[in-house]
Image (cartoon, grey):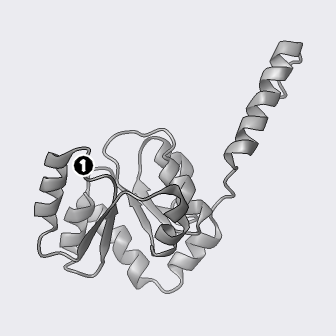
Amino acid sequence: MLLEAARLLKGEVEVHLYGDTTVFPDYVATLRRLASELPVTFHGRFERAAAPGVYGGLDALAVPSLWPENSPLVIHEAFMHGVPVIGARMGGIADLIRHDVNGLLAEPASPASLAAMLARLTREPGLPQRLSAAAPRVKSIAEDAAEWNARYERVLAGVPAAS
């Protein structure tokens, strides 16, 4: 989806793909073919310690999933690093992104819709900054674990759930 959207924008956007290129080599070969003659860079995987630098180098993160994901960690990470997100309007992605508030939503499986959202980010002055500023605070893993632990303790103690 992203590469097809980039092709529709005729070089207006630069695409940086991250991910382990050894896991699905046939898929990666297909992506490389689709990326030919486009401004696309394949970076491969990165270590957690490199995340601030990777996210810091992005103008936006595209998550054009084709299936209803529940709550992609990559979106939470982008929010943590102040990176606006364009995602597919489906599943948990649409629950995390409030269209035109803290990100943009494109229609699923529509390169044209994704291209339109990418174009908005490049053409509308101040839009990336406005979306980034509205990103929700993301709880740390330790905070989330503590909340779940407290819930389990209440259940075990027979304390009714708050309404």
Q: Is residue 158 toward the left or the right of residue 95 in the image?
A: right
* Quadrant that contains the N terminus: bottom left
Q: Is residue 38 toward the left or the right of residue 66 in the image?
A: left
Instruction: Quickly name the residue at label 1.
Output: 22
**Where residue 66 appears, x then y in whole percent?**
30, 45
Residue 52, placed above or below residue 146: below
Q: Which amino acid does label 1 sit on?
A: Thr
**Residue 147 quadrant:** top right
84, 97: nearer the viewer: 84
**Where residue 120 appears, x then y in whole percent?**
40, 76
**Disc 1 secondary structure class:** loop
Q: Is residue 34 toward the left or the right of residue 119 in the image?
A: left
49, 120: nearer the viewer: 49
| Residue found 19% across the figure and 72% down from its top | 8
**Where residue 70 appears, x then y in whole percent?**
48, 38
Q: Is residue 120 visible?
A: yes
| Residue found 57% across the figure and 64% down from its top | 102
| Residue found 55% across the figure and 67% down from its top | 52
| Residue found 26% across the figure and 44% down from its top | 23
104, 38: nearer the viewer: 38
Residue 133, placed above or below residue 137: below
* Quadrant that contains the C terminus: top right
Residue count near mark 1 (Cα–Cα under 10 Å), binned few <14, some 14–19, many ≥20: few
